[in-house]
Image (spheres, rainbow, N blue to C red):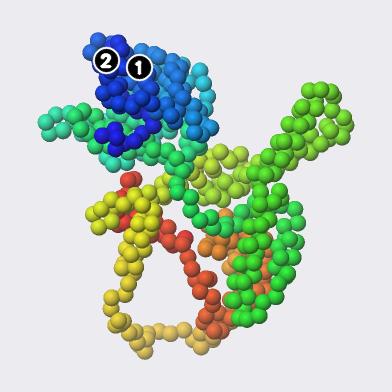
Amino acid sequence: MMNNWRADVYCFQESKINGDISGVVKEIRANRRVKYAQLEARGTRGGIIILWDSSIWEGEVCEVGAYCITCKFTGKTQVFEWHLSSVYAPNSRDEREEVWGELGAVRSLFSGPWVVAGDFNVVRYPSEKKNCKRLNKAMEDFSDFIEDMELQDLPLEGGSFTWRKGDRQDIAARLDRFLISEEWEVSFRKINQSILPRVTSDHNPLLLECGNWEKQTSYFKFENWWLKTQDFNERIKDWWNSVTYVGRPDYILACKLKLLKIKLKEWSKTLHGNLGIQKQCTLNQLTDLDLIQDQRTLSEDESYLRAVLTVELEEIAKREEVAWRQRSRALWLKEGDRNSKYFHRIANCHKRYNNIDKLTINGANVTEPVEIKDGIIRFYQELYREAEGWRPQFNPRFQSMINEEDNITLQGQFEEQEIKNSVFSCAGDKAPGPDGFSMAFYIQCWEVIKEEVVAAIQNFHDQGYFEKSFNATFIALIPKKVGASELKDFRPIIA
């Protein structure tokens, strides 16, 4: 089974082993690259073994307690350092209090990404235990510990319980889990906790998968913080008027928006259009001033430059907050609330929740991205295909009708003020369409682009036609439940 799991690090709880375990490790994983750490069992109970691939991780034991063992891992193929605490908690509530204290003391020894994994012998909610109806003090203690340590309790995919007992397995609970720190959560975009098949143990193995998704084509997305940069409207005006196109108004608008995307992509890679470059450049200058100050007192000009750079860094932080707020869709929070870290976590959470990395298609499990995409397209092509050519007809002869004056008003040409009012009534932070431009762009740059926008809309009123790209939209598949595996488990939402 371990050959199929292909994990970098393994944790075994309740090993019930004392003394030298080198022979046991060879039986479990006959590989010379495997290193291990051990918390010996007390009598016939407890015991923890941690195995890791030494070609990927440099591991060392940091702390060994009565109920947990903590190891520090440093990447050999990537720059990443983290800690793992493997736990086997007792059944007694009083003894579990010692576990929470032990883990709290361990956390005080280091900072950074932290994973706590093991058999906690307690659940958090009644729903995590079969036939349990009441929340008790042990559950509250466990939840309090998780909150005090600022850990994240990940959703469990593939099932509800990790331990079963009895011939008919009528006793079941979620005793095992992975808990991750905030630093671990922001280090990875893809984080999944799932149940693996149970073989001989009464516990199911759990798998924690972390990493990044397959790199996909990067589409243009307008960043609202660009609107706050100096002379942005003048820059847009120069680009917008730099080229003249001939054709239908909708064609001209589509071409100008396409040109603008190219210009903005190029500009976004420069100092003024890239927050990362701005931030690094400012930090480098502040570092240089620190080095100078170590040698001598800063001059008046240098002190003034430090003050200016500090203000610039503050402005960059505000723009980062705008960018992450836009991506997180947490629009109920105001800009300036110092929630950049929260917005970042929400954006990653959305990405994890909405990512489809496996799917059941025609009864078969599919994990290849290309096959998943093809399966989704075929499913919705069949779903939205019109089977019948006949449509019912409606005869309004005996229905009440509006008068001629109202009819003329309703069918009249769209006026510029009507179009402007419609545009300005839209929320600037809402998700952009396939063209990548947010409504905030159309609102702030209205005086520059209004002529082409109004002409395209009025031409559509007269001719009943516009560029095909204007009618394109995104369809987002939102899972109806945790662990959605079939396409019927997803709800299509038009973005």
Residue ID for mark 2 = 17
Residue neighbourhood size for the residue with mark 1, other residues' Cα within 10 Å, grouped as few (<14), some (14–19), many (≥20): many
Q: Amino acid at mark 2?
A: Ile
Point out residue 405 in the picture as x, y percentages from the top left corner: 54, 86
User: With 300 as the anchor, is 216 left or right in this view?
Assistant: left
Q: Contact, CB < 8 Å: mark 2 with mark 1?
A: yes
Examine the image and state in which quarter residue 37 appears.
top left
Seen in the picture, residue 295 relative to 189 is either above or below; the reply is: above
Residue at the right extreme, as displayed: 300
Q: Amino acid at mark 1?
A: Gln
Seen in the picture, residue 491 relative to 20 is either above or below; the reply is: below
Q: Where the N terminus falls, by quadrant? A: top left
Q: Nearer the viewer, residue 177 or 402?
A: 177
Seen in the picture, residue 167 relative to 159 is either above or below; the reply is: above
Q: Nearer the viewer, residue 361 or 482?
A: 361
Q: Earlier in the sequence, mark 2 or mark 1?
A: 2
Residue that appears at 45% across and 49% down: 214
Point out residue 321 in the picture as x, y percentages from the top left corner: 61, 44
Examine the image and state in which quarter residue 196 appears.
top left
Q: Nearer the viewer, residue 177 or 267?
A: 267
Whether residue 192 is visible here, answered yes or no, is yes
Which disc number belongs to residue 38? 1
